[in-house]
Image (tube, helix red, strand yellow):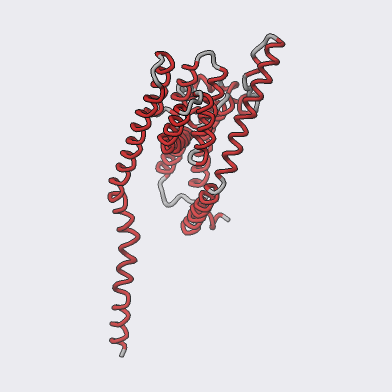
Amino acid sequence: MIAFLTNPLNLMSIGVGICAFAAIFTVVASMTGGAQLETRMKAVAVRRDELRRRSRQAMVSGSASALRHTDDGFKKQIVDMLDLSKRLEDPKVVDKMAQAGFRGPKPITTFYFFRMAMPFVFMAAVGFYLFGFNDFGLPTMNRVTATVAAALAGYYAPNIYLSNLIAKRQTSIMQAFPDTLDLLLICVEAGMSIEAAIQKVSQEISTSSIELAEELSLLTAELSYLPERRHAYEGLARRTNHPGVRAVTTAMIQAEQYGTPLGVALRTMAKENRDLRLSAAEKKAAALPAKLTVPMIIFFLPVLFVVILGPAIINIQDTMAK
């Protein structure tokens, strides 16, 4: 077992297998978007019904504490015992969790727990491998440095993972946001109220972006429950954290406050967001040749040389053999 784990070829084979599994899992996961959408929309509906039920119970009992989520798990006990919420305090962690699609106290507790645990896990794994299985011929100081670097990487790993989730979610939202504004404009100009329009658009846009459909459903619920509609729009801007969405929410707040026509604002914002999406696509297309240079040199040119020179080398060998 030790010889198998210390063989670089076996490690490379394991890495290739993991990459192949990740590719297959990504393709399969992309085919189950409908089930994921139904699960998320059902969760939003269940949560809305639960809030209504708890709100009625709170009014009867005279207490509103039952409306909040509670977290009494093992990770919560560790976080409270070590006082990690203060030692690893991040003032933006709540907004980051909302931007990544996590809500309630449990994701925050999980984040602090893994931020504390991952440095020890990474350090133990790297140190155990370098000092117990294969040192790769490195001096002791270099192995200690690699172990400390692994602990540092483990400390930043939860933040990197959370940032990747936020970026992926923002990309999904902004790709469908201009079309959402167009549909919202059609519904508003047809005479629908803004709540009914947002609810209708959240159902129609679900095939393009599950994340945006979820955010719009949550916006509809907040428009019904929050004392001021402005707070609901500001919550949407805070959860998405994108300039295009913030501009649209600001326009909707101003239209609500000053009585300006909402259709004109939506038409203008739809055009601006469509231009932003087009400029982002053009930026990616312009950067594509530079990104393809190294893969072409590494993967395409050797194969091209083999295809071109291979038959000629075989003919030369046959001629010299005769």
Which residue corresponds to the image point at 45% horizontal and 20% vertical from the top-left?
Answer: 234
Q: Quadrant of the N terminus?
A: bottom right
Residue 256 appears in which quarter of the rendering? Answer: top left
Rendered location of residue 5, percent (x, y): 53, 54
Q: Can see residue 257?
A: yes
Q: Is residue 111 above or below residue 141?
A: above
Q: Quadrant of the C terminus?
A: bottom left
Rendered location of residue 233, percent (x, y): 46, 21
Q: Can see residue 6?
A: no
Q: Is residue 127 above or below residue 82?
A: below
The reply, left or right, for residue 38 in relation to residue 133 is right
The reply, left or right, for residue 111 in relation to residue 287 is right
Residue 315 appears in which quarter of the rendering? Answer: bottom left
Count how many numbered circles sit on residues in the image.
Answer: 0
Rendered location of residue 17, percent (x, y): 51, 55
The reply, left or right, for residue 39 in relation to residue 234 is right
Which residue corresponds to the image point at 50% horizontal and 55% vertical from the top-left?
Answer: 20
Give 259 or 110, whichever is nearer the viewer. 259
Give 267 or 237, whichever is nearer the viewer. 267
Give 146 or 287, whichever is nearer the viewer. 287
Which residue corresponds to the image point at 56% horizontal and 23% vertical from the top-left?
Answer: 221
Give 178 or 308, whichever is nearer the viewer. 178
